[in-house]
Image (cartoon, coloured by chain):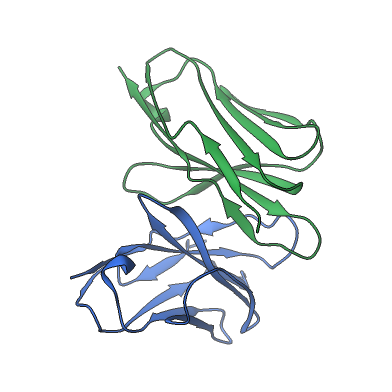
Chain colours: A green, B blue
Amino acid sequence: GQQVMQIPQYQHVQEGEDFTTYCNSSTTLSNIQWYKQRPGGHPVFLIQLVKSGEVKKQKRLTFQFGEAKKNSSLHITATQTTDVGTYFCAGEGGGSNYKLTFGKGTLLTVNP
Amino acid sequence: KAGVTQTPRYLIKTRGQQVTLSCSPISGHRSVSWYQQTPGQGLQFLFEYFSETQRNKGNFPGRFSGRQFSNSRSEMNVSTLELGDSALYLCASSLAVGRGETQYFGPGTRLLVL
């Protein structure tokens, strides 16, 4: 079945440093979504990427979808303490498979 | 609009018991998905319901079951609880099933099995 791998599992940075998490799928995806879960909270939708090579920005966050639609990345510029949390990617398969497969997430901690 | 609500928020059960969790989706949302979240396995898909029909199912044993009512509210049931069922159970609603539907998650039910 479809697998979505996400690395790194953990990342600790100093405030102001950049952060990147990577997501790789075993199969071609129709789209990929990114979610953020604050400690003690629940996942909250950030963005969806659909097109091959797509790049989207939300303030300090930059999301990319690979040309082959099998990988994606989330880059945060100049991290802040409010960025702390676990970032999940979730890939949706092709065909009639609408099921979202989540990566295991990257836990980001930021030292002020 | 009110968000997704889940009840109860916390639950303690013992091995062998059964448990029912409830989820009320965002008003107007007709699809409800359930996920199990554990530190080791991350977010694992249990099942998805739309219009009272199960549309997708993950790789969980038959002890895990669910249903959806005509008002889109959903319940999931776990019978014969095992220690490994201790987890955060998240419900997510979306407008419909289909390509690219955004999942809106509830706060979850934290289940501890002793």
Quick check: A45 left or right of B99? left
Q: Disc count in the image?
A: 0
Percent position of residue B110, x then y? 30, 63
> Measuring 54% from the left and 38% from the top, which residue is drawn there?
A6
Quick check: B104 left or right of B86? right
> Measuring 36% from the left and 49% from the top, which residue is drawn there?
A41
Residue A10 appears in the picture as rendered: yes
Q: Quadrant of residue B79?
A: bottom left
Percent position of residue A46, x then y? 57, 41
As drawn, the residue found furthest toward the bottom would be B70
Which is nearer the eye, A92 or A55? A92
> Measuring 65% from the left and 62% from the top, which residue is drawn there?
A99
Percent position of residue B28, x then y? 62, 70
Quick check: A23 left or right of A96? left
Q: Quadrant of residue B71?
A: bottom right
Percent position of residue B85, x then y? 33, 68
Please determine whether, in this image, residue A14 is positioned above or below residue B77: above
Q: Quadrant of residue B5?
A: bottom left
Residue B27 appears in the picture as rendered: no
Quick check: B102 left or right of A105? right
Which is nearer the eye, B88 or B96? B88
> Measuring 47% from the left and 76% from the top, which residue is drawn there?
B61
Which is nearer the eye, B84 or B56? B84
Rendered-image quadrant of the C terminus of chain B: bottom left
